[in-house]
Image (cartoon, rainbow, N blue to C red):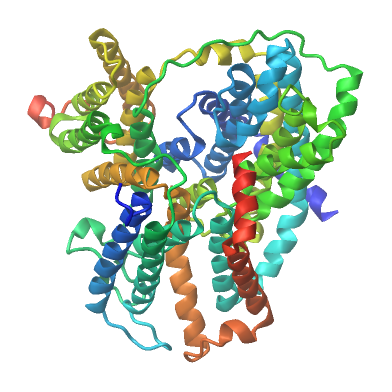
Amino acid sequence: MDILSNLELGFSVALSLQNLFYCFVGVLLGTLIGVLPGLGPVATIAMLLPITFGLPPVSALIMLAGIYYGAQYGGSTTAILINLPGESSSVVTALDGYQMARQGRAGVALATAALGSFFAGSVATLLLALFAPPLADLALQFGAPEYFALMVLGLIASVALASGSVLKALAMVVLGILLGIAGQDVYTGVPRFTFDITDLADGIEFVALAMGVFGLGEIIRNLEDEHTRSVGVQKVTGLMLTREDFRRIVGPVLRGTALGSLLGILPGGGAMLSSFASYSIEKKISKTPQRFGKGAIEGVAGPESANNAGAQTSFIPMLTLGIPSNPVMALMIGALIIQGIVPGPNVVNEKPDLFWGIIASMWIGNFMLVLLNLPLIGIWVRLLTVPYHVLYPLIVGFCCIGVYSVNNNVFDVFAMALFGVVGYVLVKLECEPAPLLLGFIIGPMLEEYLRRAMLISRGDPLVFFTRPLSASLLLLALAALVVVLLPSVRKTRDEAFKE
Amino acid sequence: MSRFIRNPKDVITGGLLLALASMFAYLSLDLPMGSAVRMGPGYFPLMLAGLLALLGLLVLIGGLRFEDAGEPLSLAAIPWRALGLVTLAVVVFGLGIRPLGLGAAMGLSVFLSALASRRFRLPTALLLTALMVAFAWLVFIKALGLPLPMRGPWLGGY
């Protein structure tokens, strides 16, 4: 079996002492920031990007991946214990998890979350190992029009699946693309939108944009109203699930895993949407829906499995096509590019140690997370008592040194300060910053494939519609756009996000 | 709020988008356009600027027609102190990193951003600053070996 020898290669890479160490650092940091509200994986990974310069690519990616799925675990801990979701993907876990904790079943809720996540993570990792290579082979046959169509579909889907106004999200994507293509034109060397500033010749630094908008903007937003954090932490007792509990969670875990795996692959999907979708499905098919919101164990098991599966499978489009499905994956692509690796279908074949090493490390990382989360829960709980006004100046400091060390360029620091204000303004105007970041990353690729496709077709735009694959991808994108703009669908979508 | 503008947030967004679109369009017009076969550097951006203007217009019109469902925009709720101080902290870091070195630049930026909170206490802020400077020295200079002096030329370093 091919896959077995590949997995063997992966485990041999991931089990090296160095990579085990970085995997551990990643999941530990991930859990930490997942526990701390107000600090998300996007800002953390952006801060750590510069540090990954000095690491080998495999170790860098293993660590960054660990932060992402570790954050999903950590976020659920705070959701259950103090009704304060550390991550947006754990919002629904708080609904029933906190109620369980109030009924003295905090341990059971935490164990359910950990076991469900572990199961879902393992399955999703296996799916990734099974489906990514054939998908990459398929992608190798893609021409420029197909890539262009795929990216358009990805951008539209991320807009359709985001919460809030579709029009504004679309505008954010377009604005992101425009910012992304600033700098020297790759074909002609003509500087674009640089205002004759030499520092802008290479374009806007991605880390400055990401950290400004997601790091600083978020801090300013959090300083708007500083509440005392409720430290009414629920006591943790009895981690063991009863037989009855097991019987109840089997279905939700399986369904959540399937749902999360599927939604994770979709651009813009990932962890958050998966958990929301899983919760509403569990509530809908339950014989006793009135128990939901009052401590139903199914309401913890389903979403927790789903968000972890979604976090895992969102690596598939990134690793096989080089197309990010959410801002975290955009940062991963940034990390690969820093290492001189062009993300895309060639990664699987040309860098098998990287590809399979990451996959194997995810399974190991998930295992570490179970070990980390259950026995060490007391430490995580104590961390919650760190007040925000102590935490955020440190984050500002990290952002500064982080963005400076990317290019040793002061200009990037000033750019980050500007984007911090921009990020705050965007949040105030209810414009989602995530589509902006996706557009920024995809923008240059989108333009390149468009120009290449037009060159091949001798300027005939019909090329996108005469090739069956690109035509169907574009039709799919159009359908997605029409569907979300229909008023009736929009209503249910808003309700789904409200729930 | 006047009856004419139903949703000020969307009207502002639409206006901003239109302004940005015009700026990008104006800048693109200076660039070689090329043809559809051989697109010049200005072709794609001009298309995007047009799209952005259209979207901005739609958002603007929507803001005039439909009521705002979310929380209303209020200038009083904007944390001017946090906005100003956090931004200042970052700018000061940028200005100070070369002449003052990592130690002083980091210290200043952490202290300034600590000032942004309404829960600011001098002892805590000083402790945080010292902690972060020590940490930056340990991790970024000792462990990662970034080519940064702890003390810059203005402070007697090199």
In this orientation, which residue lies closer to the viewer: B152 or A449? A449
Please state, as top left, top right, bottom left or bottom right, where the C terminus of chain A lies in the image.
top right
Q: Determine which quarter of the picture holds residue B137.
A: top left
Q: Is residue A47 above or below residue A266?
A: above
Total labels: the figure holds 0
Q: Is residue B141 above or below residue A200?
A: above
The x and y percentages for residue B17 are 33, 61
Q: Quadrant of residue B120?
A: top left
Q: Residue at x 52, y 48 (%)?
A: A332
Residue at image coords 22%, 56%? A199
**Left or right of residue A438, residue A274 in this image:** right
- Nearest the eye: B130 or A309: A309
The residue under the point 57% across, 54% down is A325
State the image coordinates of residue B58 (x, y, percent, origin top left).
41, 66
Measured as percent of width and height from the top left, residue A338 is found at 43, 51
The answer to whether residue A404 is above or below residue A297 is below
Q: How far across and down, in percent of the image, does residue A480 sit?
A: 62, 65
- Indicate whether A133 appears above or below B136: below
Let me know if residue A6 appears in the view.
no
Quadrant assignment, res A146: bottom right
Is residue A358 or residue A123 the one in the foreground? A123
Specify the farthest residue to the front.
Answer: B3
Depth check: B8 or B111 in front? B8
Q: Is residue A389 left or right of residue A141?
A: left
> Is any part of residue A464 visible from this angle?
yes
